[in-house]
């Protein structure tokens, strides 16, 4: 058994099967009656976890593959909610996803709450995991919310799953028999909305307030929560959004989506949906490796608008309050993860695609920017992709949300790993957000305890009140944190320096190169 196989075996050993309880032998104090059954959780260290609760009436298997999620149906049964559900198939080329126990039977959620006797309705925070829309799952130990709830018992946290990769984001309607699959290109987002619907209808039974829900996520999860306000009918299920390193820029056009489908189908020797339906999940999973970091939600003009930036500017999310931002060295994470040589090859291919679409004048701006970032061999592409995928879209989202009459709090995270390449890379803040100091970044460094606690406190304060500011009495370091709303004139952002969280104008940090890279946000993730 090789190292990868050993890792998979170890992680799968943490799973179990939630069974129906028919003999009445369960702790009634840990049982919650919901629309689709009574679910019995497990308590440990003052926190009750309800794991593996289905939020659909039919799992997306067999005839339901590439079909919209189905509503739950009333059920009087009593069920264990002891174990994590299986994770969604995604992309075999991304190691994170392949470490999980994968299945198409994957649409489940976990509810985490403090085991206290409070009677008031608690604010609810719903986590959408990242993983490039191709990997990840609620079983990830990083998203175990026990430590978070022990420190912040005044909220309830829900972690949700959704279909990934070719199962959640595959354009099919252009195929000869594709008319019956009009939603296949954005099923992952529809799954998230169905999970939010379940939360809306059931979270009060756990002590949560269905009218005070914050959705939050990182990377693909952040892209998701920034897109959900643009889906018709979704806003009834949440009031606030926390988006960590992800925006509507993490999307693709219909043309790019169709190109991915054609590439996949050709590699599999298929020409119709019927032929694709006959393939087992493993074969589709393996073939999807060729589409790595290209399987984004589609700006289809049906579920998502063709121009999300315009939708925000027109006020589509004006009733939703946003808290969003980016890290100082986002793309450096990918350099470390891929290795310098592999990253360089991949990034040069992405840059070639981008340069084929921009104007001659824009090409000159890109070339000028890259020339200034040549201190390391990987730096020109790394810095440019940080700008185009993260920094520029982050500021564009703040600008457009404010233009549309909505509220937006914007941040810039700066603490670094000691690794000279990683620096303040993508996802480096997750261990701080979920209170897992034992899960340090890849280079073995955890952040200052007070900084991490303050970060969590700000997130919870925003979920509770819609304003992330802290008084001196509320702040773990005893210093007030007054976070100004973003406004286009001064462009204020909250800078998360490890030992000094404070607001600054964007220009003080040069978060985006307004002349040479801001326009790239119009090209999304080419």
Image (spheres, rainbow, N blue to C red):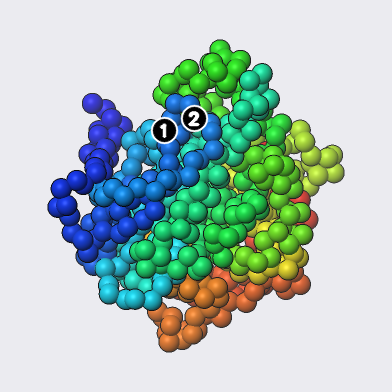
> Is residue 375 something that shows in the picture?
no
User: Could you say where residue 75 lies in the image, as x and y percent from the top left?
Assistant: 35, 47
> Is residue 159 something that shows in the picture?
yes
Quadrant in which residue 4 is drawn:
top left
User: Could you say where residue 181 lies in the image, as x and y percent from the top left?
Assistant: 60, 30
Is 251 above or below relative to 151? above
Is 492 above or below relative to 205? below
Q: Nearer the viewer, residue 209 or 490?
A: 209
Marks 2,1: beta carbons within 8 A = yes
Cα separation, mark 2 vs mark 1, equals 8 Å
Circle 1 residues within 10 Å: few <14, some 14–19, many ≥20: many
Label 2 sits on residue: 65
Whichever of labels 2 and 1 marks the residue nearer the N terminus, that label is 2
Q: Nearer the viewer, residue 263 or 455?
A: 263
Quadrant in which residue 460 is drawn:
bottom left
Residue drawn at the location 64% of the way across and 33% of the way down: 182
User: Could you say where residue 176 lies in the image, as x and y percent from the top left?
Assistant: 66, 18
Image disc number at residue 104: 1
Residue drawn at the location 54% of the way across and 62% of the way down: 238
* Quadrant that contains the C terminus: top right
Question: Please, what secondary structure does the residue beneath circle 1 have?
Answer: loop
User: Could you say where residue 44 lies in the image, as x and y percent from the top left?
Assistant: 21, 61
Is 236 above or below relative to 491? above
Residue that sits furthest to the bottom in the current view:
473
């Amino acid at each position: 058994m090789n190292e990868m196989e050993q890792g998979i075996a170890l992680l799968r050993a943490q799973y179990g099967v939630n069974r129906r309880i028919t003999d009445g032998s369960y702790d009634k104090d840990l049982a919650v009656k919901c629309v689709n059954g009574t679910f019995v959780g497990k308590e440990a260290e003052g926190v009750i976890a309800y794991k593996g609760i289905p939020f659909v009436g039919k799992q997306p298997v067999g005839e339901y593959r590439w079909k919209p999620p189905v509503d739950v149906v009333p059920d009087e049964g009593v069920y264990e909610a002891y174990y994590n559900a299986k994770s969604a198939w995604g992309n075999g080329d991304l190691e994170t996803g392949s470490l999980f126990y994968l299945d198409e039977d994957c649409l489940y959620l976990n509810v985490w709450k403090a085991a206290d006797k409070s009677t008031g309705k608690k604010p609810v925070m719903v986590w959408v995991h990242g993983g490039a829309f191709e990997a990840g799952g609620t079983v990830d130990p990083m998203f175990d919310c026990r430590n978070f709830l022990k420190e912040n018992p005044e909220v309830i946290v829900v972690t949700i799953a959704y279909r990934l990769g070719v199962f959640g984001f595959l354009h099919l309607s252009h195929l000869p028999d594709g008319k019956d699959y009009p939603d296949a290109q954005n099923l992952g987002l529809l799954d998230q909305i169905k999970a939010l619907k379940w939360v809306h209808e059931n979270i009060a039974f756990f002590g949560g307030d269905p009218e005070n829900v914050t959705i939050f996520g990182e990377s693909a999860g952040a892209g998701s929560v920034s897109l959900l306000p643009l889906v018709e009918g979704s806003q009834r299920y949440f009031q606030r959004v926390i988006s960590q390193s992800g925006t509507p820029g993490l999307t693709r056009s219909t043309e790019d989506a169709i190109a991915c489908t054609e590439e996949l189908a050709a590699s599999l020797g298929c020409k119709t949906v019927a032929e694709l339906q006959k393939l087992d999940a493993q074969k589709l999973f393996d073939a999807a490796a060729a589409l790595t970091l290209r399987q984004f939600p589609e700006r289809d003009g049906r579920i998502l608008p063709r121009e999300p930036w315009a939708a925000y500017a027109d006020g589509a999310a004006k009733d939703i309050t946003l808290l969003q931002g980016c890290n100082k060295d986002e793309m450096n994470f990918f350099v470390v993860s891929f290795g310098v040589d592999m990253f360089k090859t991949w990034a040069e291919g992405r840059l070639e695609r981008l340069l084929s679409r921009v104007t001659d004048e824009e090409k000159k701006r890109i070339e000028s920017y890259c020339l200034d970032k040549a201190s390391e061999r990987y730096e020109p592409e790394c810095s440019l992709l940080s700008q185009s995928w993260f920094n520029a879209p982050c500021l564009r989202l703040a600008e457009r949300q404010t233009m549309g009459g909505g509220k937006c709090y914007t941040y810039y995270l700066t603490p670094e790993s000691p690794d000279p390449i990683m620096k303040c890379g993508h996802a480096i803040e997750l261990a701080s957000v979920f209170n897992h100091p034992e899960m340090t970044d890849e280079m073995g460094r955890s952040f200052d305890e007070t900084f991490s606690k303050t970060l969590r406190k700000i997130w919870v304060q925003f979920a509770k009140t819609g304003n992330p500011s802290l008084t001196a009495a509320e702040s773990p370091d005893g210093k007030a944190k007054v976070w100004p709303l973003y406004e286009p004139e001064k462009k204020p952002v909250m800078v998360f320096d490890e030992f000094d969280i404070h607001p600054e104008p964007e220009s003080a940090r040069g978060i985006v190169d307004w002349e040479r890279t801001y326009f790239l946000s119009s090209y999304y993730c080419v």
